[in-house]
Image (tube, rainbow, N blue to C red):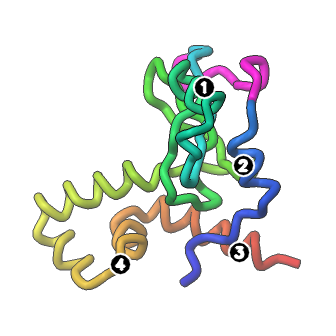
Amino acid sequence: MDHDREISKAEWAGSVSGDSKADRPPCPECGSAAVASMLYGLPNFDDEKLMARVKRKEVVLGGCCLSSCSPRWKCWACGHMWGRVDGTDGPSYDIHQLTRELFERVRNDPEAERATRGMNLIDAILTLNPEVREAFEERERENKRP
């Protein structure tokens, strides 16, 4: 199963562009304006402008795991992450949080450990999270439509 579609260069550039404060939406959970855009991929740590934005909490380094369901925004006030980097509607999922939850569940639940034994990380996450599986499968269906 192909869980992710390839993110276009335009979409990736959109996920790292210099959003102005006016472009950042308020948090839908708590209403805070303390919102940062997510940056995926390997950042250039020598880029002084980028590192200044990270320090000012305008940008969050999201890691190298990017899918069409990766979150676009993070609220510093409540920690909520939402939106999709590809701009489509639907739920977003932080692969790092899902991984932490998977490891915790497998460590504490022998049935979950048995159910995911021998699976790769993504398949294990999707096996134990039906709502995440449905979101990824819906994205696959959308990507296959002409």
Task: Name the front one of labels 1 and 3.
Answer: 1
Q: Which residue is mark 3?
A: 141
Q: Mark 2 highlights which residue?
A: 89
In 3D space, how far apart are the residues under numbered discs 1 and 4 (Cα atoms)?
A: 35 Å
Name the element at disc 1: helix
* Residue identified by numbered label 1: 53
The residue segment tinted magenta is 19-30
How packed mark 2 is, by other alpha carbons closer than 10 Å (few <14, some 14-19, many 20 or more), is few
Q: Earlier in the sequence, mark 2 or mark 3?
A: 2
Q: Nearer the viewer, residue 25 or 30?
A: 25
- Percent across and percent down for residue 95 are 44, 55
Q: Residue at x 51, y 45 (%)?
A: 62
Residue 104 position in % (x across, y down) = 20, 55
112 left or right of 21 in image: left
Spatial separation of the CA atoms under disc 1 and disc 3: 36 Å
Q: Label 1 is placed on what type of residue?
A: Arg
Please, what secondary structure does the residue beneath circle 4 have? loop
Q: Earlier in the sequence, mark 1 or mark 4?
A: 1
Instruction: Name the front one of labels 4 and 3.
Output: 4
Residue 122, quarter of the rendered image: bottom left
- Between the C-alphas of marks 4 and 3, the distance is 22 Å
In contact (CB < 8 Å): disc 1 and disc 4: no
Please tell me which residue lies in front, 94 or 59: 59
Q: Secondary structure at mark 2?
A: loop
Marks 3 and 4: in contact by CB < 8 Å?
Answer: no
Main secondary structure found in the magenta portion: loop
For discs 2 and 4, the disc positioned in front in the rendered view: 4
Residue 21 covered by magenta stretch: yes
Number of the label disc, if any, that sits on residue 120 = 4
Residue 51's quadrant in the figure?
top right
